[in-house]
Image (spheres, rainbow, N blue to C red):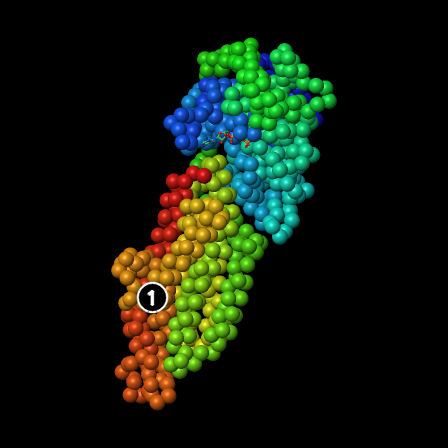
Amino acid sequence: MVESKEQSHNGTSTTTDVEALPDAHLLNEAVQSFSFEGLSVSVPVKGSKEERRIIDDVSGLFRAGEMVALMGPSGCGKTTLLNLLAGRTSDLSPVGKTFVNGGELSRSTFRKISSYVEQEDHLIGSLTARETLDFSAKLALSRSISTVERRRRIDALLASFGLVENQATLVGTPIRRGLSGGQKRRLGVASSLITCPKILFLDEPTSGLDSAASFEVISYLKNVCKQNRLIVICSIHQPSTATFNLFDTLFLLSSGKLCYAGPLAETSSYFGTLGYEIPHFYNPAEYLLELINVDFAQDKAAATEQLHGIQSSWRSSEKLKAITQSIATVKSEKTDVVLEAQRTRNQILIPFILLHRSFVKSYRDVFAYGVRILMYLGLAIMMGTVWLRLSTHQDSIQPFVNAIFFGSAFMSFMAVAYVPAFLEDRASFIKERNNGLYGPASFIVANFLIGIPYLFLISFLFSVVSYWLSNFYPSGAAFFYWVMWLFLDLLAAEGLVVLMSSLFPIFVVALALTAFANGLWMSVGGFLVSPRVLNVFWKYWARYIDYQAYVFQGMMVNEFSRRNYQCGEGCHCMYPSALEDKCMIDGDAVLQVYGYKTGKNGEWAGILVAIIFAYRLLAWVVLKLKKT
Ligand SMILES: Nc1ncnc2c1ncn2[C@@H]1O[C@H](COP(=O)(O)OP(=O)(O)OP(=O)(O)O)[C@@H](O)[C@H]1O
């Protein structure tokens, strides 16, 4: 155990016992202070031209090794302020400035020295704790860091967050229990430290945890903060007394305004001088929150008056003057932020690291592909037994057409089963992109590549079962053409899921829109309304970009261009063709009814490939433009 003395921002010192870390790569020597002045944000009030200030003239200064609790009643602006400090408010226009070591930093440099841990972990459930850190490290660290060094850093982080014994435990999926809630939260924090940030922002790191687990998370965090002189800023709801006392500094907000900002140890005396003694044996956090909360007060007018009094006392306090003076001093003594020179990461490798991670996920997480493989196999058995051993008699022509439609359209429709898995991956991507690990191109490429073997396997298994059971044209070439059409169908359907879920990353909305789009493609694809009959509105745009239409006509040609069928009793032929005098129907006659030409396989497959790439390209554009 070592003892460290830290200077808090108004010059008083706090003493803490901390455990020595086995490694010092996290040590912050670059950032001595993080300050901000006059931060304000207004949002329009719905239905009026007025604006409401949700953060109102907030200033503060934190020093290396300081652990800050950002506290206040629900809706007071904690998350907004945290995002503002972290430079993550793309939809708002804040005023005020932030300084690191007294100087302003560009957004990209600030990203390099800071990290943000969101309330939701967005960890991949089918990876172990060590793998989670290992993949984060591979994505984050430049190649100049050797494998041995990377492992050493991971070992250090596992040790720092008490996860050594659980390093081989899975994070946990809905059907496989893994780490506990507190362990998951610690792992989330550890993985955001892999980039060695100097300033760490955490949005309610204890939400959803019981008081024991909350205490554990914050104490591990505190040790790391002290040992490495990091600046740690946490928004926190209502900590227990023990957890509250772990913080050095309290930043107390209500209705967007500061009520107190200073050492936690001085909170009691400060509020005492205002006439609000924190009672002994009472949770101080709870007392302070009740004091400044207007929403649940029985006498709203009195509570509001009390709050205004506390806020105005803060504005005229000596403590605020000391903070303002300290900010002016650090600005006048401005020093540069000197970061270690890092070789840039090899961007080409990133999709392959993501691919490796997705591969591990896909074979461990049955929900990613396993359930879909089973679902499609079930569908193949159902289809093969319903359309069982069709003959080459003309009575089987319509069932063949129906089977082709059902096979292609229903397969695309069932791709909606991929929505939840994609939304989980997208959430990890957003978190990792915000922490500067990689961009949408790497994500889209890796996501596309990982799908290829699984979708091929699904297409192949589905066809092995249903093609031969239903007695489609029995030749190896025809079988593999069929597999090809199905494979392209699934690739396009998955691309549609990726596009819709990127546009509307809400499960029900993505599901409904994908189903709607597939319903539309199904309706105009050529089976339900023949292209000869389809009205011009749909005919001249929708059909050309309808992937299901190309799959349907490709499969139709595959079956009917190769076979002839026997006419009915008395040589009655349902489709007139040149073979009528032999009591046969030339399969081409069926194709003519739909207006399908033969010899166009290459063109149609090419268009399908273009549609598949177009969906991915559009999804990339959406992810590039949509930051959350
Ligand atoms: N982009 C925005 N547009 C309009 N209003 C917003 C926006 N962001 C936040 N607000 C409003 O600002 C206030 C503060 O929100 P914020 O989420 O920061 O509070 P909070 O203290 O983190 O709340 P909680 O503890 O409940 O999570 C709320 O009234 C919220 O509705």
Q: Position of residue 250 (x, y in %)?
A: 59, 22
Foreground pick, 147 / 163: 163
Foreground pick, 86 / 268: 268
Residue 109 is drawn in which quadrant? top left
Report which residue position mark 1 lands on. 529
Count of numbered labels shown in the rendering: 1
Q: Say few, some or many: other residues with alpha carbon within 10 Å of mark 1 (under 14 / 14 to 19 / 20 or more).
A: some
- Looking at the rendered structure, the kind of residue marked 1 is Val
Residue located at (59% from left, 13% from top) = 11
Which structural element holds mark 1? loop
Residue located at (37% from left, 62% from top) = 523
Q: Position of residue 467 (x, y in %)?
A: 46, 72
Look at the image and tell me in which quarter the C terminus lies.
top left
Foreground pick, 593 / 172: 593
**Residue 241 shows in this picture:** yes
178 over 531 or under it: above or below = above
Residue located at (49% from left, 54% from top) = 418
Respond yes or no on whether mark 1 lies under 8 Å from ligand 1.
no
Q: Position of residue 444 (x, y in %)?
A: 42, 48
**Residue 335 shows in this picture:** no
